[in-house]
Amino acid sequence: MSVKYTNAKVDLTTTNLTTLYQPASSPSTTGIVKSLIISEDAGATPTITITIVDTADTPATFNLFKTKALTANGTTELLSQPLVLTAGELLKVQASATNQIHVVASIMEVVDDIIN
């Protein structure tokens, strides 16, 4: 088992649902999102929706933050506890407006690299 620290970041230039992070399936990886920072950079008040999509479950979508309001030129840490994602789960983000939101996730990845 090994541990790697990484980040995932996106500038939301569209209002499409966008994958921010997906743990690797080979080798099997667990992603522990330690921080999820949202920054509004256009002086507007858009909203953001953050979901987990479990592709192994039909797929099923779970809302973490549904139309979370942001303040103009504000930065917000959304997590108060770590968020665990396993292979087959996707962390997705969607903005209500284009070119206004940056998202940065700090992630600890635990990789099951034991050879059978």
Image: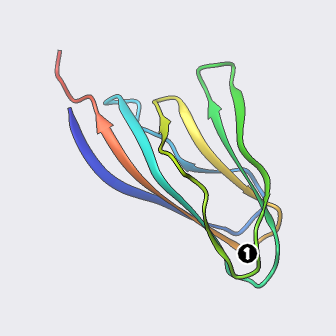
Q: Residue at x 44, y 39 (%)?
A: 23
Per the image, the residue denoted by label 1 is: 100
Task: Locate the C terminus by quadrant.
Answer: top left
The reply, left or right, for residue 3 in relation to residue 76 is left
x 70%, y 82%: residue: 73
**Quadrant of the rendered image containing residue 54:** top right
Label 1: which secondary element: loop
Give percent across and percent down for residue 35. 48, 56
Q: In this view, does 20 lie above or below 63?
A: below
Name the residue type under label 1: Gln
x and y, in percent, of residue 102 in the image: 62, 70
Q: How is the image coloured?
A: rainbow
Identify the residue shown where x is 48% and y is 37%.
Answer: 84
- Give whichever of 14, 107 is nearer the camera: 107
Q: Measured along the vertical axis of the image, is residue 2 above or below residue 36?
A: above
Residue most extreme to the top = 116
Residue 114 sits above or below residue 64 on the image: above
Describe residue 107's horizontal placement relative to residue 41 as left or right. left
Judge left or right: residue 99 versus residue 4: right
Compared with 30, 18 (above or below) is below
